[in-house]
Image (cartoon, helix red, strand yellow):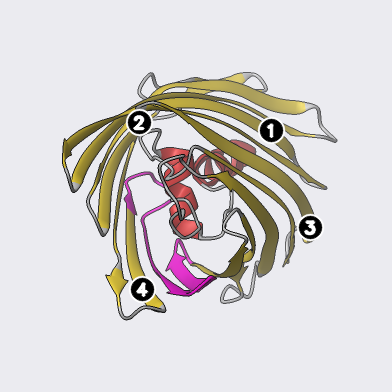
Amino acid sequence: MKKQLTFLAFLGVFQLFGQNISYLENIVLFSNPAATVKYKFFTNTGFGGKFSYSQGTNFRYQLQANNYSKIQVKNFQFGAGFTSFQSNFYRSGSFQLDVNYTFYLSRFLKLSVGVGGRTNKFMYPYENVGSNFITGLNSGIMFEGKKWRAGLAYSNINRPEIQFGNDTGRIRPAINLYGEYRFTLNESWSLTPQLHLHNSDVLGFGIGATAYYKRLQFGGSYGYSRLSPFIGYSFKEKYMLGIVSRLNLFNKNNPFVNSQLNFSYIIPRKKEKTPPPLPSF
């Protein structure tokens, strides 16, 4: 039972968080298939590691790699991504596909609707105990204005079944809400507050802010008892390099540091002489 609860807790986090330049922004790309990117093509690749210590299990390490890409074809955007984890406690992998369509309601308002699905595998390497499940029919909507966006995602619509050893269970559906607004302070500075709400047993809310100074982006978020600072820099209007970390230094029984280096590449739309600033979302 203890391992099942550990797995379910991990699964809730794993389904929502890859890691990108901004922690909250990446929540949306992974959990809401209606989330769009601003370019003809966008891809992000990340590598990182997590190191933790607890009184019950002592030292743990985790290595991770992930990629997420989206391509636009007229009003459609097609996305694909994977995430892989390797540690001395568990191994896991995930692959997802999604598609969305954008309706242009007015000059400054558009609506995107999307569906997607994901396949996961999780196991304890030394006990040969694992689980497979397929999350189908994840859905979402996203409204976007000139300086804001707000969206809703409904995940695990089909209540996918989990097989964990000899036991089975089901993942209950979850609702995600996300909103952000960008304030333009002057020609060089802008600020984007962000809010994320989630109704699962594991997660609750996240708040954060992203500051932009010319080609530099930095900020942080707090939620789920985690502090997540990040910093990134875009160059040649096509590339972005960034570092994002998750810190849990407040819990003396299980402190950890999880850092990841990310690299993004974009192809702008043909009609845009100067592409919008990174990150794409």
Secondary structure mostly seen in the magenta stretch: strand
Under tag 2, what secondary structure? loop
Give, as a three-letter code, the residue at label 3.
Arg
Residue 173: mark in rendering: 2
Q: Position of residue 258 (x, y in %)?
A: 67, 62
Residue 93: mark in rendering: 1
* Residue 239 appears in the figure: yes
- Asked if marks 2 and 3 touch (Cβ < 8 Å), the reply is no
Residue 60: mark in rendering: 3
Give, as a three-letter code, the residue at label 1.
Gly
Q: Is residue 114 above or below residue 253?
A: above
| Separation (CA) of disc 2 from disc 1 | 21 Å
Under tag 4, what secondary structure? strand
Which of labels 2 and 1 is toward the front?
1
Question: Which of the two residues, 255 or 96, is positioned nearer the viewer here?
Answer: 96
Under tag 3, what secondary structure? strand
Is 21 placed left or right of 28 in the picture? right
> Label 4, on which residue?
191
Crowding near pointer 2: few (<14 within 10 Å), some, many (20+)? some
- Asked if marks 2 and 4 touch (Cβ < 8 Å), the reply is no
Q: Residue at x 85, y 35 (%)?
A: 126
Q: Earlier in the sequence, mark 4 or mark 3?
A: 3
Under tag 1, what secondary structure? strand
